[in-house]
Image: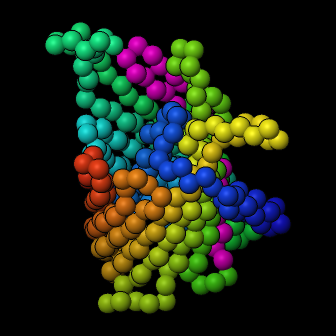
Amino acid sequence: MKFARCALLILLIAALAPPSFAFEAGTQGLLFLRLGVSERAAGMGEAFTALADDASALYWNPAGLAAAQGTNLSLSHNEYMFSLRQEFAGVAHPTSMGTFAFGVTALTMDEMELREEVPTSDPLGHFSAFDVAFHAAWGREFFGSVQAGLGLKWVYSRIYEDNARGLLFDFGLRHETRIPGLTVAAAALNLGQQFEYRSEAFDAPLTLKMGAALRTPFRPADGDLNLAYDLLLVGDGDVTSDDSLGEARSISARHHIGAEWQVLGMAALRAGYKLGYDSQNFTAGAGIRLGAYRFDYAFLNVDNDLGNSHRLGMGIDF
């Protein structure tokens, strides 16, 4: 118990470190690893670090796997801005040694025209680009109310004739507090090696997260009202120098707020908001459960004429 509390404290201190507030992505690569999965999470503004308790915890927080109720399958399709499409499939299975989960995330796009540095009237041809990550994770409960999890992902990225590959790690904690309905969590995602396109090296998008979720005592129309909040610290890739500290990578802070109203365990309405982004803000979603099957939809409002995002997903509880 002392170890778990110390680990949570360390992640909390990291999350509260002074940010530079340089929002949006910088020069890091593999930014598809920051595109969340699960339409339930998307509808709640991606405030999901403390709520994830199924196969989607592969992305959000591997400690959430320890709270999985039985074997479950999660599928997700995201029509993102421009011609980008994101797919996710994951399965989680509890055992006496903890819950094990496996999954895959892929980001694809339509072919683009290939041109020289000096524009020409006709393209030289077409090329494609895609990213894929294969996930494996384990989560287990300790001391009755604290869950811990570890995740491993093998990542492959290809742009035209260049490709990069390597391994990354995730670590997470989750604690069901003595306050009725309150769960807190923390996670460190995308830890590991540098990647390289030919001779150009770059880092994976390191993310530190703190989250809290509350099942409120209010029951509007005999439904459950869940509230959630996430604080994210992300390295945006910009490097600053200081004579006393040397080089340091700048950090951006982002805030995610979400709410969910579940009615009789059969239907749900969701809403959320993201702060600290140049173009993302309001989200909304809905879900319905038919026996062992769950169907979800989420909408993400995107400014700057980039195009909104529509997401569809389903889950199966075995």
Residue 139 at least partly seen: no
Residue 307 at x, y percent in the picture: 24, 48
Q: Magenta span covers which residues?
A: 155-177
User: Which quadrant of the view contains residue 50?
Assistant: bottom right
Residue 116 at x, y percent in the picture: 30, 11
Number of marks: 0
Nearer to us in this view, 137 or 108: 108
Look at the image and name its color scheme: rainbow
Residue 272 at x, y percent in the picture: 39, 68
Q: What residue is drawn where x is 35% and y is 42%?
A: 87
Looking at the image, residue 58 sits to the left or right of residue 19; the answer is: left
Q: Is residue 160 magenta?
A: yes
> Is the N terminus in the top left, top right, bottom left or bottom right quadrant?
bottom right
Q: What residue is drawn where x is 54% and y is 49%?
A: 22
SS majority, magenta: strand
Residue 144 at least partly seen: yes
* Vertical arrangement, residue 95 with respect to residue 86, above or below: below
Q: What residue is drawn where x is 63% and y is 55%?
A: 19
Q: Is residue 218 magenta?
A: no
Residue 286 at x, y percent in the picture: 28, 67
Q: What residue is drawn where x is 25% and y is 29%?
A: 110
Looking at the image, residue 18 sits to the left or right of residue 54; the answer is: right
Nearer to us in this view, 238 or 296: 238
Looking at the image, residue 8 sits to the left or right of residue 126; the answer is: right
User: Which quadrant of the view contains residue 167?
Assistant: top right
* Vertical arrangement, residue 313 with respect to residue 215, above or below: above
Nearer to us in this view, 229 or 149: 229
Q: Residue furthest left?
A: 121
